[in-house]
Image: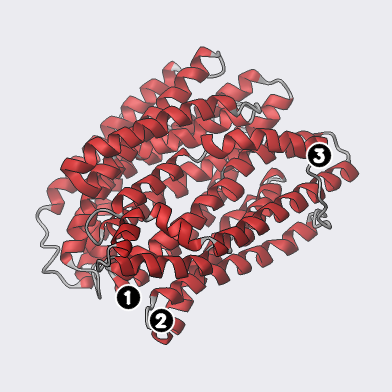
């Protein structure tokens, strides 16, 4: 089982790597065209709201509620019942997200005023930033329908993941990045405000992603005619699991929306600086944390169905070790190289040296919470696979309230950086609460071997961080040419990786530590 999980994790990570690399290319293109100005702030704002709903309906709460029930139905071996279940879920979900999209388009001004309250107040008082509110209202009409297409894409991906066809769903986001990049280059000059070209890229990307997955669903024999099934017993079960999960699994996204609301009161560029730093954080989070969480949920669901508590615990322990060996050094590197990374990745065109500096500060704050964010991706499925959605909801409420308090406390002295700090702290609190409850329930406790493993990884990461920090300050990043910056960064990454691996081996880490999960 562990070897299969590892292979699946590698496949998802490889596809996710491709998606994240193209995502970085997309963000580089956006930074080049728009920098961190008003247009960039509004585009990131208009893209964040449908992305929040995507996490609810597509990747987050829906997947966490749907996959355990789908696994349960699939394990019974009744193909007719499986197809009927898929048909009724697709029809019910499709109707809900269709009308959600319509409401979002018609109520775009309300959404812009609610989550961009600072801009709305400026609009009411005829201040310059009031134009951002008008622009956001119009742009949301283009980006909001994305929720319909991506929700059905997430539904198809969840089915394929349950059937152990992980590569398709992991590759699909590549198409969104290609769409946005293409629209940026082809349509940017056709609009008075070029950000609209990017908004249309989001819309088109949603359509393309859904169309891409349909043939694979057909090949699996599960491309069935949608049916309305609100009162179907299995759909009802998904619905009951999903309602609390809507909140519990998406706490981090709700926190990001609250950050956006507060940032709308701060200086121009705040939303963009937070976005660019969050994008660099999302690279390792998606590559390692989300990839492992994607393959672990169906496996934990099967462990639960077959009452294999020992295998359940061992698979979580395996996932913790795997995200640690990749997540802790990634967080260290992001913290130490925050400024050079911003310079290398984004500083060109409209993205200035000041933007690099400002964004690097929030990246340092976010990096402190990276490993915690990854642990949440591991611990939350441990509840959802057992069809327990209430516990994560309770902790989600606590975490969100804590984040709001930290936002108010830290935003005053630290501005937008305080928002990133609050996100990192609340993410750590969420991970801790989830773990303590798993331990108290006797479901999972970190083994002694894994504690020693974590200590070794911390020592190796600290050694790596010390080296790259020393080497980085010897380099004149701002005065160097772009090709030189790329060379310097490559050398730092390679040097850090070599030191990290040497230290891991010297401290006794071996391949068996990554394949010793449930057999």
Query: What residue is pinned by disc 2?
Result: 188
- Please, which colouring scheme is shown? secondary structure
Instruction: Please name the residue shown 14% across and 51% down the image.
Output: 471
Residue 71 lies in what quarter of the image? top right
Q: Is residue 112 above or below residue 441?
A: below
Asked whether residue 3 is in view, the answer is no
Q: Are marks 2 and 3 in contact (CB under 8 Å)?
A: no
Instruction: Residue 497: give x, y in percent of width and height.
Output: 30, 47
Return the mark for residue 33.
1
Instruction: Residue 233: give x, y in percent of width and height.
Output: 81, 35
Instruction: Please name the residue shown 64% across and 30% down the image.
Output: 385
Callout 2 secondary element:
helix
Quarter containing the N terminus: top right
Dot 1, how many residues are within 10 Å of its Cα: few (below 14), some (14-19), or many (20+)? many
Callout 1 secondary element:
helix
Instruction: Please name the residue shown 21% across and 49% down the image.
Output: 361
Residue at the limit of the structure toward the bottom, as seen here: 190
| Mark sitting earlier along the chain (3/1) | 1
Query: What residue is pinned by disc 3?
Result: 231
């Amino acid at each position: 089982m562990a070897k299969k999980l590892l292979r699946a994790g590698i496949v998802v990570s490889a596809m996710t790597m491709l998606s994240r690399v193209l995502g970085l290319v997309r963000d580089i293109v956006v930074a080049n065209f728009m920098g961190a100005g008003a247009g960039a702030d509004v585009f990131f704002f208009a893209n964040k709201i449908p992305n929040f709903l995507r996490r609810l309906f597509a990747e987050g709460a829906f997947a966490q509620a749907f996959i355990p029930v789908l696994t349960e139905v699939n394990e019974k071996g009744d193909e007719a019942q499986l197809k009927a279940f898929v048909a009724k879920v697709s029809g019910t979900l499709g109707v809900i997200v269709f009308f959600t999209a319509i409401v979002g388009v018609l109520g775009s001004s309300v959404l812009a005023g609610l989550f961009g309250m600072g801009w709305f107040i400026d609009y009411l008082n005829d201040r310059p930033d009031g134009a951002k509110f008008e622009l956001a209202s119009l742009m949301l009409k283009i980006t909001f329908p994305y929720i319909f297409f991506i929700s059905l894409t997430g539904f198809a991906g969840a089915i394929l993941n349950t059937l152990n066809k992980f590569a398709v769903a992991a590759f699909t986001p590549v198409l969104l990045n290609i769409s946005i990049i293409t629209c940026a280059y082809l349509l940017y000059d056709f609009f008075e405000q070029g950000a609209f070209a990017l908004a249309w890229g989001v819309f088109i990307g949603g359509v393309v992603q859904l169309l891409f997955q349909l043939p694979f669903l057909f090949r699996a024999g599960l491309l069935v005619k949608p049916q309305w099934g609100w009162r179907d017993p299995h759909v009802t079960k998904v619905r009951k699991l999903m309602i609390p999960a809507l909140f519990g699994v998406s706490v981090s996204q709700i926190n990001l929306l609250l950050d956006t609301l507060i940032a709308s009161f701060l200086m121009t560029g705040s939303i963009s600086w937070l976005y660019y730093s969050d994008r660099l954080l999302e690279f390792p989070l998606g590559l390692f944390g989300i990839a492992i969480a994607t393959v672990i949920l169906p496996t934990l669901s099967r462990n639960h169905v077959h009452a294999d508590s020992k295998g359940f615990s061992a698979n979580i322990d395996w996932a913790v070790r795997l995200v640690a060996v990749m997540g802790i050094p990634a967080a260290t590197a992001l913290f130490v190289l925050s400024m050079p990374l911003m310079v290398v990745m984004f500083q060109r065109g409209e993205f200035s040296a000041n933007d690099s500096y400002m964004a690097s500060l929030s990246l340092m704050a976010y990096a402190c919470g990276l490993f915690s964010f990854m642990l949440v991706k591991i611990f939350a499925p441990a509840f959802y696979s057992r069809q327990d959605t209430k516990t994560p909801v309770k902790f989600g409420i606590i975490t969100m309230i804590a984040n709001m308090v930290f936002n108010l406390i830290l935003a005053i002295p630290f501005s937008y950086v305080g928002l990133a700090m609050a996100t990192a702290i609340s993410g750590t609190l969420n991970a801790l609460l989830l773990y303590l409850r798993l331990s108290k329930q006797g479901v999972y406790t970190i083994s002694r071997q894994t504690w020693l493993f974590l200590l070794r990884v911390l020592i190796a990461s600290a050694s790596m961080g010390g080296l790259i920090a020393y080497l980085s300050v010897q380099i004149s990043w701002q005065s160097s040419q772009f090709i030189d910056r790329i060379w310097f960064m490559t050398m730092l990454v390679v040097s850090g990786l070599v030191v990290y691996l040497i230290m891991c081996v010297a401290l006794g880490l071996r391949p068996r530590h990554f394949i010793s999960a449930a057999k």
